[in-house]
Amino acid sequence: MGESRYVISQTAYVKLVLHALKHKASAVNGILVGRLKQSPASEDNNSINTEGVEIIDVIPLSHAQLGLLPTLEIAITQGEEYFASKGDRLSVVGYYHANERYEDLELSSLAKKIGDHITRYCPQAAILLLYTRDASKVWRQAGSSGSLGVGLVFKEPTANTVLWDYITEGREQDVVDFDDHLDDISKDWLNSNLFN
Amino acid sequence: MVGAAEEAELSRLESQVENGGGNIWEYLCLVKKLKVRCSEKVLRHGMALLNDAKGRSKLGGEVWTLYEQVSVAAMDCGHLEIAKQIHKRKVAIAKAQGNLSGAVDLLNKYLEIFMADYDAWRELADLYISLQMYKQAAFCFEELILAQPSNPFFHLSYAEVLYTLGGLENFKLAKKYYAVAIDLSSGRNTRALYGVCLCGAAINQITKGRSKDEKEGSELHSLAAASLVKNYKQRSPDKAPLVISVLEQMKAFSS
């Protein structure tokens, strides 16, 4: 298995950082949505080589009681269903987690457990741990088994500039996560209007 | 028994402190060492020291001892509110340092004395959940339900913890508590409605192929699903088809 590359789109990146910024005093988490990039079938047709993972979007999940399963399950089911129906080979590809205290850089066992839960849906799932002290820094951890060389790159180099603009506008207040949706179903967890 | 020399030292420090001359920490340490009971003074000067940020930081790790000493003095004087505040501050500090298990221990000690503080029970439950100690979290919610049986939030949280624990008995019990939450919230609580469907699906999965009489309660399941769909159609119509599809997969609708 060669190096796995993770490419993150501006939409996904900005959304997840804004989500973390909206809830500064608590941990937040969410699901990564995207597609697997596959290399052409090799001579030995037994294995499908995954060249990398493209993270296209995120579904922000919770900002309270992250350790409980029901919200996670409803969100994954609906998210998978929604993105699969768009017919673009989109599916759940990972999980992001931002710890409560900004100097806490450890991947908690809770985050690992949720990551495990998600690898049932996608074996190449990655966990993205957001280091929120400096909003432009993103930590990457190898969430799936084995010690792959993991790299994370931005798809659009303008991602951080755009993010900064949104932060100065205070856009993070408009982010809706699944917790917010369950409290008021008229709130849109797809955040379709966030970037207008 | 306090010896003469020590008594002199104590008086000296006491008058220094009473006259605003500082050295509060030395005074308090001596009081503690000699086991002298002068709680009012300890409380007064101890609180002054606690509220002085510079003085506090000079103490370093000893600040915990100070907190302990002052809170005991507070209780001795009957100032329960102050004792409560001190305990809460200790818990908040432990949490801010990332010492979650320390915070749990402190909260447990606090609740042994102030067992009717429901906010503390909730905070303890949240801590247990982040530590993935679900059985202990469940116990906290049991206490909260006993204390406030008409609050749907506690029944809901208890159900969520049970669901997370998993297993047939827990799913069945969770379903009952979700049902109570629906009842107490007049059918408007989305999480409870989804919860019933999730439990139903989980139970059906486990009891697949078992005798028919174990497959009870699917009526509740369908009612909850129908209610969810109705709510979505009213308030979030573009999501309704997605929800219907997901619920169908969970076999929520009676065939």
Image (tube, coloured by chain):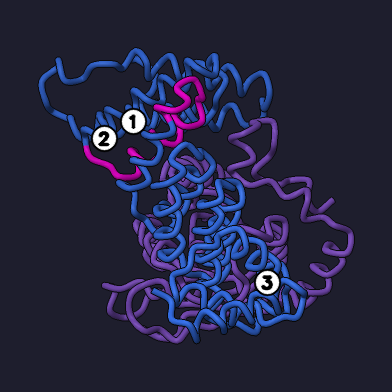
Chain colours: A purple, B blue
Report the chain holding disc 1.
Answer: B
What residue sits 63% from the left and 20% below the top? B233
Q: Mark 3 is on which residue type?
A: Leu
Mark yes or no: residue A29 visible: no
Quarter of the picture holding the N terminus of chain B: bottom left
Question: Image check: B175 left or right of B7?
Answer: left
- Choose top left, top right, bottom left or bottom right for residue A169: bottom right
Q: Mark 2 is on which residue type?
A: Asn
Question: Residue B125 or A64: which is nearer the viewer?
Answer: B125
Label 1 – label 2 distance at C-alpha: 6 Å
Q: Are marks 1 and 2 in contact (CB under 8 Å)?
A: yes
Q: Mark 1 is on which residue type?
A: Ala
* Mark linked to residue B170: 2
* Mark linked to residue B14: none
What secondary structure is found at the residue carrying circle 2?
helix
Whether labels 3 and 2 belong to a single chain: the reply is: yes
Report the chain holding disc 3.
Answer: B
What residue sits 63% from the left and 72% below the top? A102
Label 3 neighbourhood size at 10 Å, few (<14), some (14-19), many (20+)?
A: some
What secondary structure is found at the residue carrying circle 1?
helix
- Residue B153 within the magenta-colored segment of the rendering: yes
Residue pointed to by mark 3: B49
